[in-house]
Amino acid sequence: EFGAYKLSLEVAPPPPEALRLSIGESQDGTLGADSALNDEGYRARHYRFTGREGQRIEILLEADDFDTYVVLYREEGGA
């Protein structure tokens, strides 16, 4: 297709602070209009945990009101 367009670039807000969660703990939460947005523009809550290479973990995320998904990232500078 053909036509004019405009592209602009602005500074994005910093990512929300990730809450620490230890293996064996669980966390209840609520997402609402004031919840942070992830890089894809969806409401999200960020958590962090410490693990080691080769360690097996199970992550279970459930909600009755919406579809859930988990994205794992390696900590910046991690091996």
Image: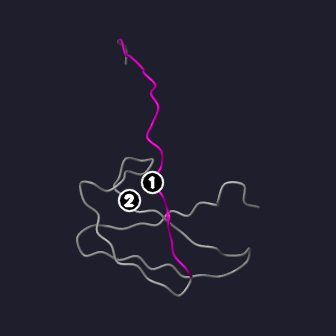
Q: Return the residue nearer the eye: 38 or 48.
A: 48
- Report the disc number at residue 67: none
Disc 1: which residue: 16
Count of number-bearing discs: 2
Q: In this view, does 23 lie to the left or right of 32?
A: right
Q: Give the range drawn in magenta.
A: 4-22
Disc 2 residue type (three-letter): Ala
Query: Which residue: 74% across, 73% down?
Result: 53
Of tags 2 and 1, the one toward the viewer is 1
Q: Would you identify the image quadrant in which residue 13 lies?
A: top left
Q: Tell me residue 34's x, y (percent).
A: 27, 54
Q: Quadrant location of residue 10?
A: top left
Is 48 part of what is drawn in magenta?
no
Q: What element carries label 2?
A: loop
Q: Marks 2 and 1: CB-CB under 8 Å?
A: yes
* Residue neighbourhood size for the residue with mark 2, other residues' Cα within 10 Å, grouped as few (<14), some (14–19), many (≥20): some
Q: What's the residue at 72%, 75% (across, down)?
A: 52
Question: Is residue 5 rendered magenta in the image?
Answer: yes
Name the amino acid type tagged 1: Pro
Dot 1: few (<14), some (14–19), or many (≥20) neighbours within 10 Å? Answer: some
Disc 1 is placed on an element classified as loop
Question: Tell me, what colour scheme is on the image?
Answer: one colour
7 relative to 24, above or below: above
Pick the quarter of the image with the C terminus.
Answer: bottom right
**In the figure, 31 relative to 76: above or below?**
below
Mark 2 — residue? Answer: 44
Who's the residue at 47% across and 32% down the image? 11
Q: Main secondary structure of the magenta part?
A: loop
User: In which quadrant is the N terminus drawn?
Assistant: top left
